Image (tube, helix red, strand yellow):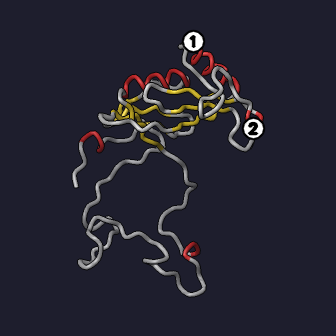
Amino acid sequence: MTLPPALNESPRDFPGRRAIEPVTSGRCGCNTDPDGPAHGRQQAMSPETSPAPAGLSFQDLPRSVEVMPVQLNHTIVHVRDRERSARLLAELLGVADPVPYGPFLVVELANNCSLDFMQEHGTVHPQHYAFLVSEPEFDEIFARIRARDLAYWADPHHRQPSTINTNDGGRGLYWQDADGHNLEIITVPYGGS
């Protein structure tokens, strides 16, 4: 399997992003049984396909890969104008300028998670993206939102305009981008932790 050149690039500019390796015969760990699943598909290990020995649960089985905490690495944000949307979000949040990566413009966040903006030629289905920020960052972002005269709300349904919320002992607000994505900044995670 050959990847397009843009997707075969090194992730050197993105800490935490792993290189994309094509699956090739003989080293992929997939089921090579001709009567099994198609070559190139890794056989999923599950209680149904790999029963645990008597007295052990599936979770007790040894793992063949290094265990690490699950973290969100990136998400794709579909937009009609990736340049406009990625640049505006980066400017509002006060993070580095977006960086091209294959078909994406990548906005990297402080926790090594990125929003990868992709040009959509069809219908954009609005999503919700929430950003946990410090109190000083909230003030800076809020000032940038007001300087651009962007509408903002205290709630996700946009029923409390030009207001910030104080949910969970912190502050928060919502605004929309040009594609209708509901963006949020909060200073305390939901639940107050």
Task: Classify residue 181 as left or right of residue 104.
Answer: right
Give 27 or 50, whichever is nearer the viewer.
50
Q: Is residue 23 above or below residue 17?
A: below
Packing grade of label 2 (10 A; few <14, some 14-19, many >=20) is: some
| Real-space CA distance between mark 2 and mark 1, rounded to the nearest whole angstrom | 27 Å
Three-letter code, disc 2: Asp
Residue 161 x %, y %: 63, 23
Q: Does residue 43 appear left or right of residue 94 in this picture?
A: left
Farthest residue, direction front: 159
> At x 25% / y 65%, what residue is drawn?
25
- Disc 2 secondary structure class: helix
Looking at the picture, which amino acid does disc 1 mark? Ala
Q: Residue at x 29, y 59 (%)?
A: 23
> Residue at (31%, 73%) from the top-left corner?
31
Pointer 2 with pointer 1, Cβ within 8 A: no
Looking at the image, the residue that sits furthest to the bottom is 54
Which residue is identified by label 2?
A: 168
Residue position marked by numbered label 1 in the rendering:
147
